[in-house]
Amino acid sequence: MTDTHDTHITGYRFSILIWVDLLILTLLTIEVAQFDFQALTVIVALLIATIKSFLVGKHFMHLKFENRFLKAVVIGVGALFLAVLIVLFSDYLFY
Amino acid sequence: MTSTTLSHAHPVHFDAYGKKLGMWIFLFTEVLLFGGLFLVYATYRFLNHDAFHTGSAQLNVVMGAINTVVLLTSSLTVAMSITALQRGDSKRAINLIMWTLLLAGTFMFNKYYEWYTKWEHGLFPGMEHYKELSPGESQFFNLYYFMTGLHAIHIIVGSILLMVVAYYIKKGTINQKRYTYLENGGLYWHLVDVIWIYLFPLFYLII
């Protein structure tokens, strides 16, 4: 398509800030795991993991600079996986 | 002047977008590969809740946490190496890749230590103690070895990719104007990091 890059540069300082956020979320997920929220424990852990993945995807994998098509496909793949997970569990929960 | 003449004689198209799109499509297949394993994990965990709890309690949380920090940091160094190359500082870009490789080595060393400790306790498929585990618990450890093992293979592959990228940055083939291969190597590395972001709480933390 294009012969050159559309250059978007993420500054060092910004990347380091994202890294600090990721470390804080890691600490949070470890702390939160000490408490037993019953079924919610998994949900909370997966939620934090998803926030971390979102940060990595958006800023480190530069999804924020990508076009709508690619963003839509990424969301689509995530939705596909979630759909399969829900279908699978609807099967087991009511078995 | 010379280069302009050359590129007119043999137009070389460099499709940065196409290359990156191809990488993303490959990453989707990786997501579905690990996704399938996560579904297997979810199912067996649901069926053997207590055994998975017992299994999880035997993993070393500190080791897992250290490896999480190591991988997150390696993602940072890859991201910064792209910034460096975009700014034309290829030397710094290579240095940052070297840091990434060092962190990858640290991750693998910790992984080796973890597996070795389990091995010493007879907790490895095929060993005597392993055979005495309850079916649910051995399911947990089978999945633990398979998923973290497959992930470790990805770390090795990613490291090789980054080594090749560093070599071509040094040669100048990957440069400030054409850095898609570095970006793609980075994309792969970040995906491997994202997979670990899920593996860590699912195996080490969940009660």
Image (cartoon, coloured by chain):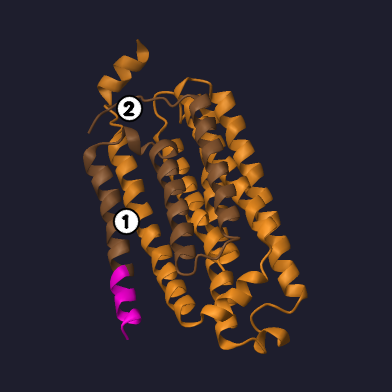
Chain colours: A brown, B orange
Residue A69: % across, % down: 22, 43
Q: Earlier in the sequence, mark 2 or mark 1?
A: 2
Residue B155 in the image: above or below residue B8: below
* Circle 1: residue type: Gly
In the rendered structure, which segment of residues is drawn in magenta? Answer: A86-95
Look at the picture and state if A71 lies above or below A2: below
Could you tell me which residue is drawn at 50 percent across and 65 percent down?
A37
For label 1, the crowd category at 10 Å Cα-Cα, with few meaning under 14, some 14 to 19 and many 20 or more, is some
Q: Amino acid at mark 2?
A: His
Q: Which residue is mark 1?
A: A78
* Discs 2, 1: same chain: yes
Snapshot quadrant of residue B128: bottom right
Residue bearing mark 2 = A5
In the displayed structure, would residue B157 be above or below residue A1? Answer: below
Q: Chain of mark 2?
A: A
Q: Is residue A12 left or right of residue B107?
A: left
- Look at 56% across and 76% down and name the residue there: B52
User: Which quarter of the rendered picture does the C terminus of chain B lie within?
Assistant: bottom right
Residue B115, quarter of the rendered image: bottom right
